[in-house]
Amino acid sequence: DAGVIQSPRHEVTEMGQEVTLRCKPISGHDYLFWYRQTMMRGLELLIYFNNNVPIDDSGMPEDRFSAKMPNASFSTLKIQPSEPRDSAVYFCASSPWTERANTGELFFGEGSRLTVL
Amino acid sequence: KQEVTQIPAALSVPEGENLVLNCSFTDSAIYNLQWFRQDPGKGLTSLLLIQSSQREQTSGRLNASLDKSSGRSTLYIAASQPGDSATYLCAVNGGNFNKFYFGSGTKLNVKP
């Protein structure tokens, strides 16, 4: 399996621009998570999906942030408009979870490093 | 809300030393606990996963233990090597269904 795939790996943009981060989870995983990592706050959970449905978006910092999962193999995290304080590494992770095999192990992508100037 | 604490925040040891990293959590109602390694500029790599019904897991030189009643987990690294230098994070899966709570990590430096 190719693992969790994220793109772009690096993004530099100017304040006010729209940013779209993409994620392909591991095939067969029921859960998808978006995290943000900064030196100051560590890893923060932004939102997670179960079977393409958003379950908990309480970590999304503002209305400028939105996430979608149109199908089981693709998710996006969008920031519009972006601000310098959004600069961070954004991670996507996926996890298999079924009642029959509830391992709940979490697998991370390599991350998207966002710099907003 | 589940809170996860990792102590120490940083650790520097000479090569060959055995060491223990600590993780504590406030709510013992967990599904599992997972230890990760993160190298600079990289994603998190899963090291060990301990289910709530288990007491420990081993992988090579790594051994992780879990004591739910006391809210503690330890990651034991035997015969440390410079290649073990990284940040180690623990994550607790519990409270809300399949929601993971992370500690802030222990940055390990193994000196040659």
Image (cartoon, rainbow, N blue to C red):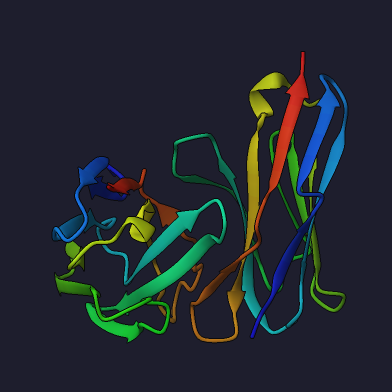
Residue A3 is left or right of residue B9, and the answer is left
Q: Position of residue B84 (x, y in %)?
A: 67, 29
Q: Position of residue B65 (x, y in %)?
A: 79, 57
Identity of the residue drawn at 48% across and 73% down: A102
Identity of the residue drawn at 25% across and 48% down: A6
Q: Quadrant of the N terminus of chain B?
A: bottom right
Q: Quadrant of the C terminus of chain B?
A: top right
Q: Toward the viewer: A58 or A52?
A: A58
Identity of the residue drawn at 63% across and 52% down: B89
Q: Quadrant of residue A50?
A: bottom left
Query: Can residue A8 be seen at all in this image of the molecule?
Result: no
Residue A97 is left or right of residue A79, and the answer is right
Tell me if residue A113 comes above or below residue A84 in the rendering.
above
Residue B17 is left or right of residue A94, and the answer is right
Query: Can residue B107 be seen at all in this image of the molecule?
Result: yes
Q: Position of residue A10 (x, y in %)?
A: 26, 40
Q: Toward the viewer: A21 or A99?
A: A21
Q: Quadrant of residue A80?
A: bottom left
Identity of the residue drawn at 73% across and 83% down: B27
Q: Toward the viewer: A7 or A42?
A: A42
* Number of marks present in the image shown: 0
Q: Position of residue B23 (x, y in %)?
A: 77, 60
Tell me if residue B67 comes above or below residue A51 in the rendering.
above
